[in-house]
Amino acid sequence: MSVRYDIEIPEKVIKTLGLRESEVSDVLKKELASYFFQRNLLSFGQARQFAGLSVWDFLEFLRERKISLHYDVAEYEEDLKTIRELT
């Protein structure tokens, strides 16, 4: 289940960021996922899924932003649960 939210972003902001309109949703999801991961609000698996990236692509995305991994047993178990649900 998912919930859809509509937000208004001024055109000037999109242009300042150098984004095309078709890129905005994907960019926002990746940035929000990394933000929530960095603040321990989402596990690695949850954030990766939210960003819509593979494990390796999300790792690279975090590396580019100099966001360190914080991975404990609880997150590992959460990721295992997510993997089992997806297979």
Image (cartoon, rainbow, N blue to C red):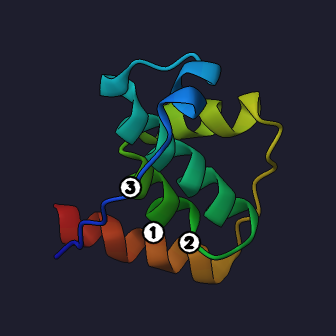
Distance (Cα) linking label 1 and label 3: 10 Å
Q: Residue at x 37, y 41 (%)?
A: 25
Question: What quarter of the picture does the N terminus occupy?
Answer: bottom left
Task: Give how far across and how far down residue 31 sits, in percent.
Answer: 58, 46
Q: Which residue is mark 2?
A: 76
Q: Nearer the viewer, mark 1 or mark 3?
A: 3
Crowding at dot 1, Cα within 10 Å, few <14 / some 14-19 / many 20+, comes out as: some
Does label 3 or label 2 sit earlier along the sequence?
Answer: 3
Of the two numbered discs 3 and 2 in the rendering, the one whose residue sits closer to the viewer: 3
Dot 2 falls on a residue whose secondary structure is: helix
For label 3, the residue is 49
Task: Look at the numbered disc 1 and give the secondary structure of its residue.
Answer: helix
**46 vs 12, nearest the viewer:** 12
Residue at 65 percent across and 79 percent down: it is: 73
Of mark 1 and mark 3, the one earlier in the sequence is 3
The image shows residue 17 at horizontal and vertical percentages of 62, 24
Image x and y of residue 16, in percent: 64, 22
The count of marks equals: 3
Residue 23 to residue 81: above or below: above
Mark 3: secondary structure: helix
Image quarter where the C terminus lies is bottom left
Q: Looking at the picture, does residue 87 appear above or below residue 72?
A: above
Q: Identify which amino acid the numbered label 1 is placed on.
A: Asp
Q: CA distance from mark 2 to mark 1?
A: 5 Å
The residue labelled by disc 1 is 79
Tags 2 and 1 touching, CB below 8 Å? yes
Query: What amino acid is labelled 2 in the image?
Result: Tyr
Q: Amino acid at mark 3?
A: Gln
Toward which corner of the image does residue 64 lie, by quadrant?
top right
7 and 2: which one is in front? 7
Give neighbour class at mark 3: few <14, some 14-19, many 20+ (Cα, 10 Å).
some
